[in-house]
Every structure is written in C-alpha cells, then in structure tokens.
Image (cartoon, rainbow, N blue to C red):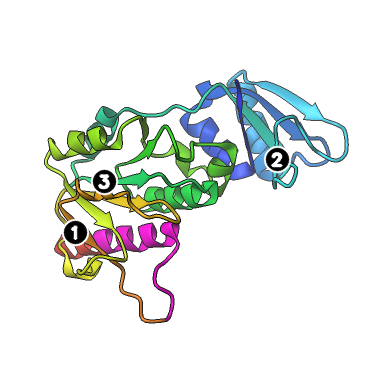
Amino acid sequence: MSKVIWGINPLLEALNRHPELIEEIIFEKKSLAGKKYQILDKAKKLNIAIKIYTKAPFSPPKVPQKANTQGVVAYLREFAYASLEEIEENWKRRGETPLVLALDEVIDPQNVGSILRVADGLGVHGVVIQKHRACKITGTVIKVSSGAAFNLPIAQVKNLKEALHFFTQRGLWILGLTHKAEKRIYELDLTIPLLVIVGNEEKGIRPSILEQCDFTAKIPMLGKIESLNVAQAAGITLYEAIRQRTIKE
C-alpha cells in the first residue's frame, strides 16, 4: 500500500534522493509559486504523475486531518530501508570513524522524526530501528525530520541483538544511554568507533539490550527533572560525540 508524505522540504528531499519511490504528487490549486513550483517542475522532468487538487479544503486521501501539508502531498511506493551493510559502507566511503544510532522500541513518530533530523545534521552514518513494537518511517516521521529520513541509511531489523552483534564484529563499541548510569557522557571517550542506543520513551532501554552494551552513560541533570525526552537525549549525546571528534582532529 502506498505511503503518504507531505510538506515542502520532505517532498524536495524525496525528489532529490529517491524520486523512483514517488508514485504521484498532489498540489493545492491556489498556490504553486516558490518551492512548490520547484517541486512541480522537477516532478514533470522526472515524469512523475501530478494532480492539481481543486476542492476546498485541501485534504487528499490518507493525509491526517490536522497535517500541515503546505499544499503538497506525495504518495510513495514504500520507504527504502537500508541494510546494515549499507550503513557500514557509508562510513567506509566517507573515510570516517563510525558513529551509528540505534533506537530500542521508540514509538513516538515525533521523537523518531526529531532524532533523524539531528542524526542527519550531525553526519551520523546510519540509524537502526526495529520492525516490531517500534515506530516505522511514516509520513509524520518524514515531515518532522524535514526530509532527513531520505538523507541517511535507516535499517529496519527484526532482532536488535543480532544487529548489535553485526556492528561489534566490525569494531564498534556499544554505548547505552540511561539515566541510571554512573558515568556522564562527558567522562567517556566518544571518538572511538561507536554505536549509541536510546530507549523507549517510558521504559528506556530493555535490560536484555543493556546487557549487550560495553558501557552506559547518562546526561547530567542539575534541576528537578530526572531525565530528558529521548530525542533531546539522543541529540545531546551525538553532539558531544561530534564535539570530541572535532577537537581531536
């Protein structure tokens, strides 16, 4: 079944990165200027099916009622998940020390989208998500990520333990992010080949996955709140890894 995405930036990223996935684009009739015209022009050149929606309000099929579409919607064949090997190839092609992110049963599409946006912005080599009991790459995720979901390899796996084993076999160390850890992220060397795991919004990282970690760390909290939102925590940790790597260079 087709997946739907919406919004100007996600559509532009889809056209630039994976135009072969786009089945059809629907535009709101009243405004086809600026970036929306760029989308229209590029879609025509790529021979992608186009429709102009003339009814008011603009509400194409399968789009959530309150979605901020910005007057443009696209239908995709299926999201193109990457393999673990493609993530490995990404850091090798770039000649960089690996930095990978894994999500353990993160279920909120707003969080997943925010995480993908910061992961792309910081040059993470790939993201691993689960096939079951976790958020998939949906239209909402793509919109929140501002199209970043199309910019980096995202692998969807049935068994996260096996995925972790894949990376440890290639020399990566596994860091589990949990507020129960003794060490703070600033006390660790994050310049090593690294895979960072963040956990479920309520339960955190599962005990069985924590057992696979080489070490755990927390973000120091100075106020009354015990922990941060998973997307915030992922962003802070990834920024610290990039900060350390930049200084080391």
The residue tagged 2 is 64
**Amino acid at dot 1:** Leu
Residue under the image location 82 percent in, 35 percent down: 29
Residue extending farthest bottom: 223
**Amino acid at dot 2:** Pro
Q: Secondary structure at mark 3?
A: helix
Front label number (1 vs 3): 3
Q: Is residue 15 left or right of residue 248?
A: right
Front label number (3 vs 2): 3
Q: Is residue 240 magenta?
A: yes
Residue under the image location 19 percent in, 59 percent down: 190
Q: Which residue occupies the foreground of this view, 196 or 193?
A: 196
Where residue 100 appears, as percent x and y from the top left, is 27, 45
Quadrant of residue 51 in the image? Answer: top right
**Amino acid at dot 3:** Ile
> Of label 2 and label 1, which has the lower sequence position?
2
The residue tagged 3 is 209
Q: Secondary structure at mark 2?
A: loop
Q: Which residue occupies the foreground of this view, 70 or 204?
A: 204
The residue tagged 1 is 190
Instruction: Quarter of the image for the C terminus: give it.
Output: bottom left
- Dot 2, crowdedness within 10 Å: few (<14), some or many (≥20)? few
Where residue 55 appears, as percent x and y from the top left, is 88, 33
